[in-house]
Amino acid sequence: MAEFCAIGLMSGTSMDGIDLAMLRTDGDHKVERGPAMFVPYEAGFRCRIEESLDEARAIVRREDRPGGLAALEKEITLRHAEAIEAFLRNGASGWGRPDIIGFHGQTVLHRPQMGVTVQLGDGELLAKKTGLPVVYDMRANDMELGGQGAPLVPAYHAAVARALPAPFSSRSPVVFVNIGGISNVTYVGRRGDPIAFDSGPGNALIDQWVAREGGVPFDADGVIASEGDTVAAVIERYLGNPFFERAGPKSLDRNDFTLDEAEGLELADGARTLAALSAEAILKSAEHMPEAPKLWIVCGGGRKNPHIMADLGNKAKHAEVILAEDAGLNGDSMEAEAWAYLAVRSTKGLPLTFPTTTGCREPAPGGVTAKP
């Protein structure tokens, strides 16, 4: 199959900036990972995105952009164009000339029960600014086929699992965990399509808690949580949510879980308890998998919280928990890499999602290609 050099762009539910990554791939078995970069959003712009979530609740159709969302979409797109320019200027172009861009955009609303998912990002404008074809809007077709529209990364996880180095290549089933604002898991067994679903709150509640109670955007290195204790009753209340009893496929909006259950805790206890919740929710996801995992590979910003990682490692039954880096991967860039991989799959008409990952009625291709 023909290979492409692709750039993937991801701005996730943590809303902290833009991840960029470059791949050389055939969109199937061949994956050669290239350079990656992160461009952070300054605090003021991050606040603008957070504030836009309230406006986004008024959206009924995917194309609606009430209030200031149209202006914000344009600015997000221009920031992505600038990030690509900086990425190529800082050496990525030396690895390969990009053929295509996979553009996720910024999710501001995800309501699968309404068949609506909205990612702010103008693919046509990005193609014009970069002079490269841009594949975007990759969730919509899945939802039209009855899927949840998320997660989309599992197709890439399955490709990565096939190429894990020893000794990890012999440990199956393997589960990839991405801890962003929302955590999601991908189960890759010995055969068959991957199984995937959102597992519960990741960093979002922790970030919201320390921002509200401590005036800081996130708990860097878990320092705040290190001064606190886990309050088991709070975790039990969260885990009592019916979401956790449902088998996948299932997906979450960033606002589906709130701080209500943590009200009354002190700053440090809240940070520690919400970190423990993130780990407990991930491990609870194993109840909905065909076999008990032998290996958990953790990606995303949440892997930098030592309390989440310690809880995962201490409580995973008969399984090893490792960082993506332990397997030679980049835990910060895997979602961006996935968007590069999916862009190539899209151009070839290959499925991006499967009934076992999103609940779509049949394996679903997707994406819209904008020409420069």
Image (tube, rainbow, N blue to C red):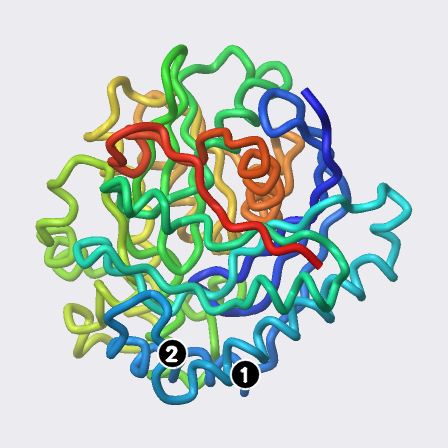
Please identify the quarter of the rendering in which residue 205 is found.
bottom left
Q: Quadrant of the N terminus?
A: top right
Tell me the SS state at disc 2.
loop
Give percent across and percent down for residue 208: 35, 74
Relative to 126, 86 lies left or right? right
Mark 1: which amino acid? Phe
- Identify the residue shown where x is 41% and y is 23%: 188
In the displayed structure, 46 sits above or below 151; it is below
- The numbered dot on residue 65 is 2
Give the distance between the C-alpha atoms of the residues marked 2 and 1, in whole angstroms.
18 Å
Q: Nearer the viewer, residue 101 or 212?
A: 101
Q: Which residue is mark 1?
A: 45
Give percent across and percent down for residue 86: 80, 65
Tell me the SS state at disc 1.
helix
Mark 2: which amino acid? Arg
Callout 2–callout 1 Cβ contact below 8 Å: no
Relative to 125, 260 lies left or right? left
In the displayed structure, 32 sits above or below 242; it is above
- Identify the residue shown where x is 27% and y is 42%: 147
Give percent across and percent down for residue 9: 61, 55
Q: Quadrant of the C terminus?
A: bottom right
Please identify the quarter of the rendering in which residue 63 is found.
bottom left
- Identify the residue shown where x is 16% and y is 45%: 244
Give percent across and percent down for residue 358: 30, 38
- The numbered dot on residue 314 is none
In the picture as drawn, the residue positioned furthest to the front comes out as 371
Q: Nearer the viewer, residue 210 or 286?
A: 286
In the displayed structure, 238 sits above or below 343; it is below
Q: Neighbour class for label 2 at 10 Å: few (<14), some, many (≥20)?
A: some
